[in-house]
Image: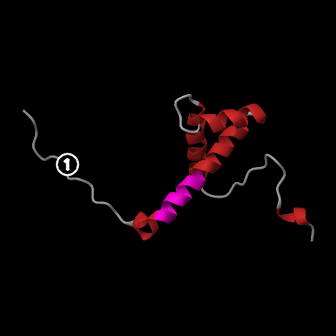
Amino acid sequence: MHSCDNKRSPGRLSRQGPEVLRWLLFEAAKTSARGCAPGYGYHTTVKERIDANRACLSQARRIVGQAVHLLADLGDEAFTIVAQPAAPSTIAR
C-alpha cells in the first residue's frame, strides 16, 4: 500500500450525496462572490490563487463544515419539529 492510495487528484470532485443538495451548495457558494457576502474574502483569495470554479467549490465545502458544526452543537434538538404559527383566520375587509 502506498500513502497516496487515499488521496484524489486536485480538482476531482466527490459525487456523493443528492445531486440537488450539491447544486444548492454550489449556488449558495456562488453568492459568496458578492462583495457584501460574509465569505467574500475567502472566495476572492482562492479565486486569485486558483480560479472562480474552485473558489465556489471550496466555499461550498466550508458551508457544509459550518452546517455540520451547527447541527452537532444542537444535538437531538436539530431534529425536533417546531410548530408553525397558525395562519390568521380573519379576512380583512
**Viewer-proximal residue, 75 or 25?**
75
Q: Position of residue 45 (x, y in %)?
A: 70, 35
Q: Main secondary structure of the magenta part?
A: helix
Q: Residue at x 72, y 33 (%)?
A: 47
Which span is picked out in magenta? 64-73
Q: Amino acid at mark 1?
A: Ala
Occupied quadrant, residue 78: bottom left
What residue sits right under mark 1 in the picture? 87
Q: Residue at x 61, y 43 (%)?
A: 26
Say left or right for 79 vs 24. left
Q: Residue at x 27, y 59 (%)?
A: 83
Q: Is residue 59 magenta?
A: no
Tell me if residue 21 comes above or below residue 27 in the rendering. Answer: below
Residue 51, picture quadrant: top right
Does the magenta-highlighted stretch encompass residue 70?
Answer: yes
Q: Is residue 72 left or right of residue 85?
A: right
How far from the left and from the top, in percent, is residue 30? 60, 36
Q: Position of residue 3 (x, y in %)?
A: 89, 65
